[in-house]
Amino acid sequence: MRRANDQPEESNTAHPCKDCYASRLLSRRTVLKSALGLGVSLHFARVADSAETDPKKLRPQIGDVFIFSSGDHQGQVVTIRDLPEGGPPAFAYPLDPKTQTLRDGSRLNRVLFVHLAQTELTDPTRAVAAEGVVGYSAICPHTGCDVSGWKAETQHLVCPCHASTFDPKDRARVIGGPAPRPLPLLPLRTVDGKVTVAGAFSARVGAEQK
Amino acid sequence: MNQVIRLVPFALMALISLFSNPVAAQNTVPYTPVTAERLLHPEPDNWLMYRGTYNSWGYSPLDQITTKNVDKLTPMWTFSTGVNEGHQSPPLVNNGVMFITTPKNQVLALNASTGELLWRYQRELPEDLFQLHPTNRGVALYGDKVFLATVDAHLLALNAKTGEVVWDQTVENYLTGYYMTLAPLVVRGKVMVGVSGGELGIRGFVQAFEAETGKSVWKTYTVPGPGEKGHETWSGDTWKTGAVSIWVTGSYDPQLNLTYWGTGNPGPFIAAMRPGDNLYANSVIALDADTGELKAHHQYHWNDAWDWDEVSAPLLLDVQRPGKSFKALVHAGRNGYLWLLERKADKIDFVNATPFVRQNVFTKIDPESGRPTYDPQRIAGIGKRAEFCPSVWGGKDWPPAAYNPQTGYLYIPANQNLCSALTGQETTYQPGQLYIGVDFSKIELLPTAEAKDHIGEIQAWDINAGKKAWTVKFKSHNWGPLLTTGGGLIFSGGTNDRYFRAFDAKTGKLLWQQRTNSGVTGVPTSYRIDGIQYVAVQSGWGVDAQRKQELLDKAFGTKTFVPQGGVLWVFALRK
Ligand code: FES
């Protein structure tokens, strides 16, 4: 099953703008064809994290790629070379490469990436990073704002709402502020330079319910 | 699924009372419907709306607890809400039944003399909701219903006897940044609410609904659209995301049939991003209670650049000055000035404005119009940092001021000796994302040298004389809403040391204090049952008080721990 996920998806689709989400939609037939060969992994990739059945709302699934949701590359597939080493963070939604479903049906699927020097990551963080790219839920566990701030001097993520600060080098540990727990971590792997999902979120995403 | 937990199966209780203590049967408190007439003239024993009365005085005529005996004030019972964050709502009391709200839109109905829980409503909030201000400022009462404005921008009517949802009306889409925290205002069978979301590029409004059905009656935007008066004060499309939120309950003048609302700042924070006066931001607006028509306004300051929401509704007073008696609107501004205005059927006239904290932005105020002139140094731009006083939290934030007709004093919960700095940055609007034009985490709080001495204050102003009578000073910043009473007292918490205090309303002398579980940012109220006067308040620190505390700690190199978790405290005189 692991092997199935290791297979490069869509590697032979050629478009003028190969990484554009819009042009990728045109390649749906090719994608569906390759999906047939991945029947087993489709089942396996379902993570227990969410009870949702709407594929647009499903939490990131193993093998998903990502589409930038803002910034210069908005609408394009996230590749490692688009993520500047040392930050700042980039924001994206997962895309099921087989059905081309963008999982933007829930804002809880928003993910942030920071590209850091591998040597700066703690061991457990490096283990789930992809060549120095770490992925976390972009939703603050305090009261659910988007963690969009970046402190370049310390390489810390900052939630703009009540200033909770997280260390992306160390499993998004809480450095300060009211956040009750770290940002859920999303295990990543690169496939042909594209950032893909390698496992489920480490914890429930979203604000504390209590 | 919304949950109502009724704790008392009445049949069972009746059965028990047959065999045991007959007192147990008292846990069914009969409910008295709230009429339009009762809201106009609430009985002194009750506290039926946000500030007690439509004039927003925060005054209880009850006089059993006095300056002489307040030292015997003691806790009767408490109630843990089970929730963290900012507990800001007043305990409303209607003939023995108390209603409080907590963050996350929980409503609790209690027996106001015994503390017994009658019912609990807990809204199930959407999992993708984000809350910039996790708080709620209370319910409104009418008929046999309880009205709650929710943080996912719905207006609910609950059955006052059971807590069951009678109707649920969507006011706006929370995913586009709208949310609600204020206590609704009920006037003549209509429930009025305003929307929060000033940091998220909303377009603010006040909307009225039929209390009986939840049907919308009128809706008035606080940012005028094309063709509406005042639209010309916004450039291009800036009005579409112009903010001007409404997050504190309005006042009401029954003679003029006008509701008065304080309005929030325009968005984004950076003035250059929305050239023009930006009506009706940072204003008081007068809306006809029946039609919502905007009959009059006064803009305290134009083209705001300091995040100085002026959301507190003005207090309605009759002012006597030599040679001039008039019906006034009084507002202690976040901008640090105390505003005195005259209210009329079709306009609001400027009378005067006096700074009540250090303010270095206004260079003069036009004596006719009240329009301030600004020091351009104090206005941040894109890439341009500017320092200004008071801070972004202002001379007085949302905690309501109070007026005592016996002393003739207006009481202001103020913050002194604090300034701020902002630096603008380019921002593009994205629905549901912060849209303020500054890096939120880089909003600076700059205490002056005097801040070491004190920050928080309660100021008393003799309104007829136009002079400050006295000031109480606290080392801590002050987030304490005020209650004043016929017993010549002021009640307030608000400081980071967790105290709830009573002061002499004439002199400001501290007469009593009680340490509570957390910091008190709740609105205190007073009521009477069976001849006993009670004072009630929620203690539960959070939201802006907590954020400001963190910035102060950073500035002073201190570490202040204010525990969170809401508890309702109810006090009466020790026998
Ligand atoms: S939501 Fe992030 S710090 Fe509060």
Image (spheres, coloured by chain):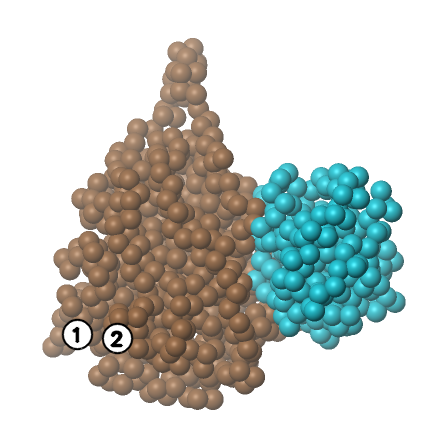
Chain colours: A cyan, B brown
Q: Quadrant of ligand 1?
A: bottom right
Q: Nearer the viewer, residue B471 or B214?
A: B214
Q: Which residue is mark 2?
A: B466
Q: Residue placed farthest to the top in the image?
A: B19
> Please, is residue B277 above or below residue A83 in the view?
below
Chain letter belonging to callout 2: B
Q: Quadrant of residue B357?
A: bottom left
Q: Which residue is mark 1?
A: B321
Please tell me which residue is depicted at 35% across the width and 57% down the height of the picture. B194
Calculate the distance from the C-alpha at mark 1 to the C-alpha at mark 2: 9 Å
SS type, badge 1:
strand
Q: Nearer the viewer, residue B553 or B281?
A: B281
> Please, is residue B11 above or below residue B457 in the view?
above
Q: Quadrant of residue B240?
A: bottom left
SS type, badge 2:
loop
Given the image, on which type of amino acid does mark 1 rest? Arg
Chain letter belonging to callout 1: B
Contact between marks 1 and 2 (CB within 8 A): the answer is yes
Residue A96 horizontal/vertical position (percent): 69, 51
The answer as to whether the residues below labels 1 and 2 share one chain is yes
Given the image, on which type of amino acid does mark 2 rest? Gly
Please tell me which residue is depicted at 57% across the width and 46% down the height of the picture. B127
Q: Quadrant of the C terminus of chain B?
A: top left
Q: Is residue B42 visible?
A: no
Q: Nearer the viewer, residue B112 or B545?
A: B545
| Total numbered circles | 2
Q: Quadrant of residue A191?
A: bottom right
Q: Are there few (<14), some (14-19), or many (20+) residues within 10 Å of tag 2?
A: some
Q: Residue placed farthest to the left in the image?
A: B323
Please tell me which residue is depicted at 75% across the width and 72% down the height of the picture. A84
